[in-house]
Amino acid sequence: MRFMIMHKHDPHTEAGEKPPMELVQKMGALMGEYMQAGRFIDGAGLNGSKTRTRLTFRNGSCTTRQGPYKGDHELPAGALLLKVRTREEALGWAERYGKILGDGELEVGKVNEPWDIGLAPEPEKADAATERGGRSPQQKAALSRLETEMSKAGVLVRSTRLAPSARGKRLHFSNNDLRVVDGPFVESKELIGGFAVMELEGMEEALALSRRYAEVLGGTLEMDIRLVDPGA
């Protein structure tokens, strides 16, 4: 089974502070363990909201809001990882994608690169439809065509669709003490700070991994475990 495990930003990461090198090394060791076993699929850390742009689609029109902003009813339904030259190019793809989906929200944000977490110098230079379980056949076909176009343009790195939150869990850690909320769960006001997509045996293994993941991140945070939709 494939799971996406997402941790939420805390005040330090939201402010753009670089993580302690000890944390980077511990997380690298944890993810490296699963990578060597061939069970790590994908993952990335995300910059704070000041680096993000939120696109809201209503009645065929699109409005944008540049961060920083606080979390506002966050419940991811999927993710696309693009490699583009500029933020404007990413926003252009996102606007086309969002217009296919209809009313809802997308967020465009930069993922952390080695220089963002102090590993190297910088080189010069969810909505109601997904919670019901899917998109219409017309939307799926249009999204597939757009993703094919993204691939041909060389910007699409990976696409991940998530199953409805009814099959997920929300984890509240306080000093490594865990409280679990079974799905379906409502939107969270916490912004996503990073994610890992893993090939695991089931939810029990995902919970065990999340305990280790949370311990590396300080032991007090919110996390979501969502099943990746195998049919998407």
Image: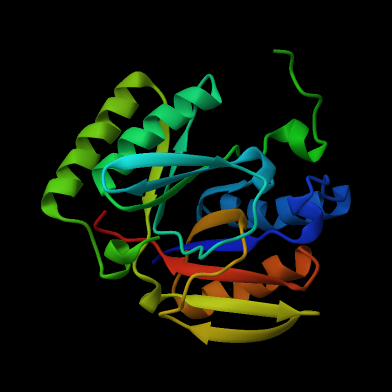
Residue 221 appears in the rendering: yes
**Residue placed farthest to the top in the image?**
125
Image vertical order of residue 92 relative to residue 211, above or below: above
Identified at 40% across, 60% down, the residue is: 126
Q: Is residue 146 above or below residue 41?
A: above
Horizontal and vertical percent for residue 131?
32, 69
Decide: is 128 above or below 47. Answer: below
146 displayed left or right of 79: left
Furthest residue in direction left, as rendered: 137
Query: Horizontal and vertical percent for residue 226?
Result: 45, 67
The mark tally for this picture is: 0
Percent coordinates x, y for residue 81 in the rendering? 47, 39
- Quadrant in the picture for the N terminus: bottom left
| Residue toward you, 3 or 148 | 148
Answer left or right for 122 relative to 85.
Answer: right
Seen at 31% across and 66% down, the residue is 128
* Quadrant in the rendering for residue 142: top left
Question: Residue 91 or 134: which is nearer the viewer?
Answer: 91
Q: Is residue 222 left or right of residue 132?
A: right
Q: Is residue 47 visible?
A: no
Q: Position of residue 116 (x, y in %)?
A: 75, 36
The way the protein has been coloured in the rendering is: rainbow
Quarter of the rendering containing residue 63: top left
Residue at 32% across, 39% down: 97
